[in-house]
Amino acid sequence: MTGVSGTGKSSALAELGRLGYRVVDTDDPGWREYREYVESSDELHRGEWLWVEETLTGLLDSDDGRSLFVAGGARNQSKFYDRFDAVVLLSAPADVILDRVARRTTNNYGKTLLERAMILDDLARIEPLLREDCTHELDASRPLADIVADLTAIASRPMTTS
């Protein structure tokens, strides 16, 4: 599950966990690391969060029979897409997102003008890239119960092989 800040990833994970599913929020400590400079084959990026590849690989290699929901976002997340049965983008209009980050109490990100501008920039620049690679997109402006119902339905679908 991916999407820009304020789309409800953490709320959906909390509810899925309450329902007994395995859940991992890659924003939690240990799942990602901040790299001051990140080199790729064609460019240099400044200051980015990356998933800790060894840690995520270990998670994806484990199986206790329950569906696993992983949420978050990092530049290297697409390296793992072939390991997931589905990549779900949660999206919502800018006004919904900004209202959510202003009201939330579990995460302070998005409270400052600079952070709100960064969220809007992510919405304009990053969300279209996420949309290109996702297998499903859910309108996250709907009630949380509807989002969770859609996520559990996606998880219960038979896997297809290509």
Image (cartoon, rainbow, N blue to C red):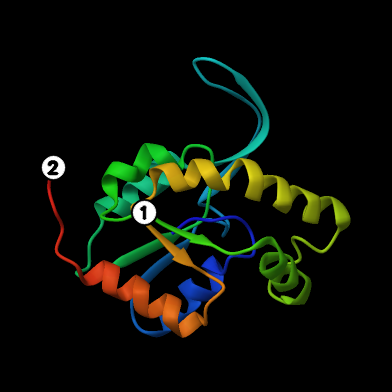
Q: Quadrant of residue 59?
A: bottom left
Mark 1, other Cα within 10 Å: few <14 / some 14–19 / many ≥20? many
Q: Quadrant of residue 107?
A: bottom right
Query: Horizontal and vertical percent for residue 47?
Result: 69, 34
Q: Is residue 66 visible?
A: no
> What is the tally of numbered marks visible in this picture?
2
Disc number at residue 162? Answer: 2
| Foreground pick, 58 / 136 | 136
Point 79% across, 50% down: residue: 117
Query: Horizontal and vertical percent for residue 146?
Result: 43, 81
Q: Amino acid at mark 1?
A: Val
Q: Is residue 73 above or below residue 102?
A: above
Looking at the rendering, in which quadrant would you find the C terminus?
Answer: top left
Q: Amino acid at mark 2?
A: Ser
| Foreground pick, 149 / 47 | 149
Point 72% across, 68% down: residue: 101
Point 30% across, 56% down: residue: 86
- The secondary structure type at the circle numbered 2 is loop
Whichever of labels 2 and 1 marks the residue nearer the N terminus, that label is 1
Q: Is residue 78 above or below residue 158?
A: above
Looking at the rendering, in which quadrant would you find the N terminus?
Answer: bottom left
Disc number at residue 87? Answer: 1
- The secondary structure type at the circle numbered 1 is loop
Q: Is residue 96 visible?
A: yes
Q: Quadrant of residue 17?
A: bottom left
Q: CA distance from mark 2 to mark 1?
A: 16 Å
Point 33% across, 52% down: residue: 135
Mark 2, other Cα within 10 Å: few <14 / some 14–19 / many ≥20? few
